[in-house]
Amino acid sequence: MDDAQILTAANWIRQARQVAVLTGAGASKESGVPTFRDALEGLWAQYDPAQLATPEAFARDPKLVWEWYAWRRDKVRQAQPNPGHYALAELERLHTNVVIITQNVDDLHERAGSGDVIHLHGRLAGNRCSADCQGAPTLVDLTALEDEGVPPACPHCGTAVRPDVVWFGEALPHAALQRAYHISQHCDLMLVIGTSGLVTPAATLPIIARQSDARLIEINPDDSMLTPHTHLKFSVPSGIALPRIIEAWQA
């Protein structure tokens, strides 16, 4: 990462009418949040996360799945936004049109100060009725419940409450996905941060942006499936690259 790259990225951001940002697990990993496929710890080391994050697993053993998500929520609560998160929040303050599209289910972008965040895979802090008895999704505020079951029961129908995240085999939230498609089609610059490019449909968004003549900047210590499609690549964590890019723009 040299000064010329930094200045190029800063200039592209300055020139852009609409900036889209796609963030993946790597952005949260910088804050200490284990990626979904990282080896689990302690009690959970014996489980395959892919076998826990399904509607079938929840139907089979709702207590087990609920407790695993409680563990994940605790990990997120302990984590703090990293410099990359704060730099994106600063970018939103400096530029008139910035939208973050995230594959992450944590709230680190919001805690850093970002206001316009599309959550493609749901929100770990949210909860909903597993039957969506009042419409999809039927969100449930656990603080208003007297039930202390594991998992608690929906106050409307008594069905088990589940985390408001997208599990394997489930469709992404329609409104979030459609807006992500729209932003990708109409942006003229996309930052692709910490994503492997393996999970669809999120992995298609940079391709859509590129096909619409947007410039792509990738920030990822590793090469990804999207690297061949990018115009500019920073092979460092976002917490290193993004603050320098924003600083160069301000200077």
Image (cartoon, grey):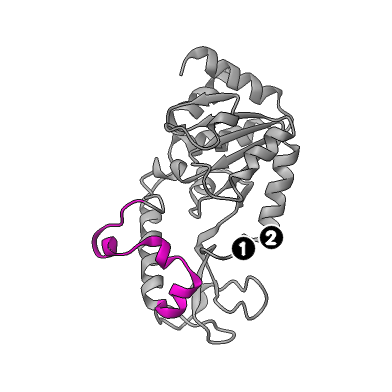
Q: Residue at x 46, y 83 (%)?
A: 146
For disc 1, the marked residue is 171
- Hey, which residue is sitting farthest left in the picture? 42
Q: Which residues are magenta?
A: 38-62
Q: Residue at x 56, y 73 (%)?
A: 140
For disc 2, the marked residue is 174
Q: Quadrant of the C terminus?
A: top right
Mark 2 or 1: the one toward you: 1
Residue 6 point in image, percent of width and height: 53, 18
| Amino acid at the residue labelled 2 | His
Query: Is residue 39 part of the magenta span, yes or no?
Result: yes
Q: How many marks?
A: 2
Q: Is residue 40 left or right of residue 18?
A: left
Residue 96 visible, this orientation: no
User: Above or below — where is 211 with respect to 134?
Assistant: above
The answer to which of 203 and 68 lies nearer the viewer is 203
